Image (cartoon, helix red, strand yellow):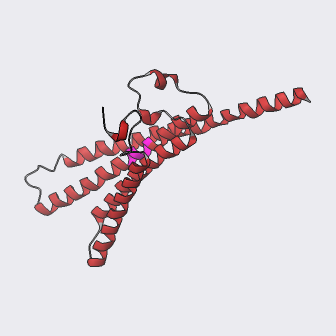
Amino acid sequence: MDLIEKIFEGLLWRSRYVVIFAVVASMAAAIAIFYMATVDVVYLVSHILHYADSSLAAEARKALHDETITHVVEVVDGYLLGTVMLIFGLGMYELFISDIDEAQNSKASSAILVIHSLDDLKQRLAKVIIMIMIVTIFELALKLNVGGALDLLYLAGAVALIGLALYLTHAADGHGAPHAGHESGKPH
């Protein structure tokens, strides 16, 4: 019975390696999204080269300006989504497979890429997702046709909720709380 239990527990423990599929797929998705966003930037730059053309009518220049701003926001959205996939892939690897030695030993590594718990991963992903939502709201606000006071009220409500979300995520990180080693929150 002891041998069967040992074999079963060994298989059970090694089953965590199935996460490799999620890691590889997440990294592939991140690369694909970064590629798509970069191609969008190349096309964006090629289209705005005509912006300074003196033969361009004022209305056409305004339309190109508005379209360019919208595309820039979409590119930022794409890069943020790629970042979500990158953080998710690295986090899953660190949580289920092994610490990434390169990240642990590197002074250049970002603290956002070092994941210590599932809550840590969720918190990092939530921050980036909130940023994606902010960019999306900004993109929608650019396209908004204000038809009356109610539309402005809705827009103001959306902006207020974004501000609240940012405040709450900032407060959840412990910003503003006294740091360890500091008496009464004052620096030495």
Height in image: 23 above or below 161?
Answer: above
Q: Residue at x 52, y 41 (%)?
A: 121
| Image point (16%, 60%), residue name | 62
Q: Quadrant of residue 139?
A: bottom left
Q: Main secondary structure of the magenta part?
A: helix
The correct choice, above or below, for 34 with respect to 150 in the image is above
Counting from the top left corner in percent of width and height, residue 45 is at 24, 44
| Residue 161: x %, y % from top left | 37, 63
Pinpoint residue 42: horizontal percent, then vertical percent.
29, 42
Which corner quadrant holds the C terminus? top left
The residue closer to the viewer here, 29 or 1, is 1
Stretch in magenta: 78-83
Observer-nearest of 169 and 42 = 169
- Residue extending furthest right? 1
For residue 141, above or below residue 152: above
Viewer-proximal residue among 119 and 129: 119
Is 80 colored magenta in this rendering? yes
Q: Which residue is the extreme one toward the front?
A: 183
Q: Residue at x 36, y 37 (%)?
A: 183
Say whether residue 58 is left or right of residue 82: left
- Most distant residue in the left direction: 54
Image quadrant where residue 175 sits: top left
